[in-house]
Amino acid sequence: MSTDKTLSRRGLFMKMGMLFNGLVVTVLAVPILRFLLSSVTRGRANRYLSWVSLGTVSQFPEGETRLATFRNPYVTPTDGNTADTACWVRRIGGEQFQVFAINCAHLGCPVRWFPQSGLFLCPCHGGAYYQDGSRASGPPERGLFEYPYKIQDGLVSIQAGELPTPGASAALLGKKPPCA
Amino acid sequence: MRLIAHIGEWFDRRLQLAAPIREVAQHPVPKNTASWWYVFGSAALVVFLLQIITGIMLALIYVPSANEAWNSLQSLNHDVTLGWFIRALHGWGSNFMVAIVLIHMMQVFLFGAYKFPRELTWVVGVFLLLMTLGMAFTGQVLRFDQDAYWGLGIGASIASRVPVLGPAIVKLMLGGPIIAGATLSRFFALHVFVIPGILIAFVALHLLMVLKLGINEWPMPGRLAKKATYEHEYRELTLMDGAPFVPYAVWKDLFFAAFIVLAIAACAAYFGPFGPTGQPDPTIIQTAPRPDYFFLWLYAVLSLLPPSMETPALLIGPVIVIGALLLLPFLSGEGEKSWRRRPIAVLTILLLAVTLTTFTHLAGYAPWSPQMNAWSSEPIPARFLQHRTALERQGALVFQAKQCHNCHGLEGKGGQRGPELDSVAVRLTPDQLIRQVIQGGGNMPAYGKNLRPAETTALVAFLQTLHPAGQAPARDASRAVALGGSGENSSVASPTSHP
């Protein structure tokens, strides 16, 4: 025991009690924080991404750009329709493709393809892109997001699973954007 | 009567609340604060209570699941007795709440009520404003429709721009890699538990300080607030010229609050609930998402900022605005309170009001967005086609088929993204028209790859006919010289246009 007069027996107990509570809080904070951050930690090292098929190569005529949909590879039971995702598939020719995210590179609104003028137009803030996804005009700072794709057994597959956003895109889509 | 008094006494013996409540009700307030200018705070509180009550009622039916939310809203709108009215009350209540909170804040600012000793009341008020806006945004998300879905996408795109932490913030906000079930669940938790909890605590703090420090006196021009003397002066004022809050001032609060609730109910009954719009199905891309009215100004700002300014403005702008609001009472905690002697304060409010109104008005018709269906839904006015050659009419077809009409208007119809073309031939020479169409520029995409030479020729021939009857189309003067006076429009060449 210390000889300090200001520290009584009760006072010491109170301090120990507070310390004990602090310890308990610290110990409990670990699982609570891990729970709260699970959606971040779970996605480390691109673990949300996987290959999904968009259909056979023959579904996409050469020289044309078509809308394709796929079910997000990472789903939870309550996702409903929200796990269905759309993307634009451009078959340049043969096995050469470009698969663009539906989300505008500005703020994520769904871009629409106009084959007659060869442009993707965004309904929100007026972003426009050329048929190769490069920026044509408007507020976007870059071209459309592109999914990595591969052709296997006559199927077109893309690597998808995360919402493409302007900040995350470089790491997310693995590929340098086709910036104009 | 005696029995009621008896029961009342029984409870008060145990609760001992009657005396403090009476004290609060009877606390003296300066007489001239019993004004219609001082009713907005209490009205905001009453609307908040209405929101809590209607919110709890909605929660009886609403299902916070991405799979079910939209259907449960439909059932509220169409199946549940008066479900539509409760939804409408909650939606209109939220609109009124944002408006009243802003008006309250403006009044407090103009009356100098944030000055010593009420700095902390103001600071808590700023947080109350932020939480009110937070409730508005999360509430819009719970109306889980197309606007909500793409609105979340916009929120995620903004959040992703935070340096380094951006991607992590997005996943934290969405509760996963995409906008889906977990996203709605966490916005439900925020809207129903987290923000209201903090809001109630902060409202209590805010009210406590109003009671402890007293309501701000009516500002007199020339009466300066000083830290050394203010509290003493205020006490004198309430003693000399004060009146008990109840009933001297409270009747105006009561009347105004009832009027506001009635106005909300009238709007709800007349206009009905908001949405939900289309299903939150991301594969339905025929949609033009719009935010609710209190964020329309932001929608306009995001469209009009130059691309390079956008990320800095999005990330630094809020810090500056919130920082300025929080620092205000510490930078000008003393001195003149009356708006009559604070021209900069009045001008600031006017500037903000004009700016926000202008942006909101612009967002109402969004001239920056292409009109996605104009090419197939807006015909070219007949007068632009009469007495035209076959080539020019072919050009008009190209104009429609290549979606030029989506961005360019003719006689006010069509998109407003680019300039209206009614008199484009006066502004641009044929060569300039060709260059503009093929190379684009000035926010117009280049069409060189998507127009065959014949199409370009036809299109430009059509564009050249677009000029008012009495006005000649533009021409290149140097060309007339180079071609020895035999160039196009040479008959109107004038010597003054020579270099």
Image: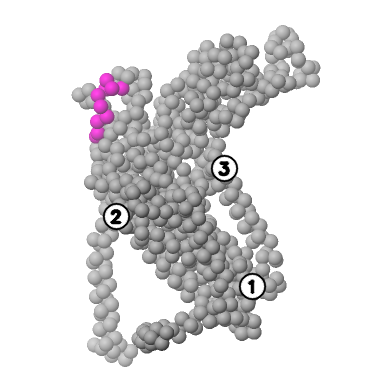
Pick the front one: B177 or B239: B239
Residue identifier under label 3? B362
- Residue A29 falls within the magenta-colored stretch: no
Indicate the secondary structure of the residue bearing disc 2.
loop
* Vertical placement of residue A90 versus A140, above or below: above
Q: Position of residue A178 (x, y in %)?
A: 40, 31
Give residue B218's mark.
1
- Residue A62 seen in render: yes
Q: Quadrant of the C terminus of chain B?
A: top right
Indicate the secondary structure of the residue bearing disc 3.
helix
Amino acid type at mark 1: Trp
Residue extent of the magenta highlight: A51-60
Report the residue at 59% width, 64% height from top: B107
- As drawn, the residue found furthest toward the right would be B495
Q: Where is residue A26 in the image (x, y as percent from the top left)?
A: 26, 67
Residue B420, quarter of the rendered image:
top right
Q: Where is residue A11 in the image (x, y as percent from the top left)?
A: 29, 86
Task: Kindly report the distance in space between the C-alpha atoms of the residues bearing marks 3 and 1.
Answer: 37 Å
Pick the front one: B283 or B440: B283
Q: Residues within 10 Å of mark 1 (few under 14, many from 20)?
A: some
- Give the number of the mark in front: 1 or 2: 1
Magenta highlight: main SS: strand
Q: Residues within 10 Å of mark 3 (few under 14, many from 20)?
A: some
Give residue A37's mark.
2
Mark 2 chain: A
Give residue A147's mark.
none
Amino acid type at mark 3: Leu
- Give the number of the mark in front: 3 or 2: 3
Report the residue at 43% width, 56% height from top: B90
